[in-house]
Amino acid sequence: MTIFLSISSLMFLTGFGYFAYRAYTLAGILADEQEYTEQVALTNAYMYSKIAEAYNKMQEIDRLGAFEKDDESGTTFQLLKQTIDELKEEFDGTQEEN
């Protein structure tokens, strides 16, 4: 009977130790993932603000309509505007969901 209790206790402690280790490991992985997600969100917001700032400067420069849609600078201006509009829509949608 003593041998049975000793073996059962040893098996229980081994199993408990294993599951405690797995829980600790998974908690660390989850914490790292949350930190990474927050960092990506900050980077995205920073990039969006810089692109919008560049777009506003381009609009300020083009206040007279010097960039024509048919030339290279006009095409670049339109592509930048389209990208900023898509980013703004995505970020505004994300902010509303939170």
Image (tube, rainbow, N blue to C red):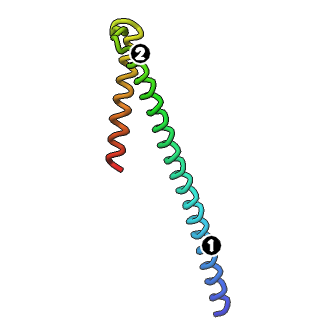
What amino acid type should be assigned to the residue bearing mark 2? Ile
Q: Nearer the viewer, residue 59 or 39?
A: 59
Image position, residue 41 (x, y; %) = 47, 43
Is 7 positioned to the left or the right of 66 in the image? right
Query: At 48% from the left edge and 33% from the top edge, which residue is drawn?
Result: 47
- Of marks 1 and 2, the one in the foreground: 2
Q: Give the number of the disc on residue 61.
A: 2
Label 1 vs 2, first from the N-terminus:
1
Image position, residue 85 (x, y; %) = 34, 28
What residue does disc 1 label?
17
For label 1, the crowd category at 10 Å Cα-Cα, with few meaning under 14, some 14 to 19 and many 20 or more, is: few
Query: At 37% from the left edge and 11% from the top edge, which residue is drawn?
Result: 74
Query: At 53% from the left edge and 45% from the top edge, which residue is drawn?
Result: 39
Query: At 38% from the left edge and 19% from the top edge, which residue is drawn?
Result: 59
Q: CA distance from mark 1 to mark 2?
A: 66 Å
| Residue 55 versus residue 26 in the image, above or below | above
| Residue 19 versus residue 71 in the image, above or below | below
Image position, residue 87 (x, y; %) = 38, 32
Label 1 residue SS: helix
- Contact flag, marks 1 and 2 (Cβ < 8 Å): no
| Residue 30 versus residue 70 in the image, above or below | below
Q: Give the number of the disc on residue 68.
A: none
What amino acid type should be assigned to the residue bearing mark 1? Gly
Is 14 positioned to the left or the right of 66 in the image? right
Q: Give the residue furthest to the top.
A: 71
Q: Quadrant of residue 16?
A: bottom right
Is 44 positioned to the left or the right of 11 in the image? left
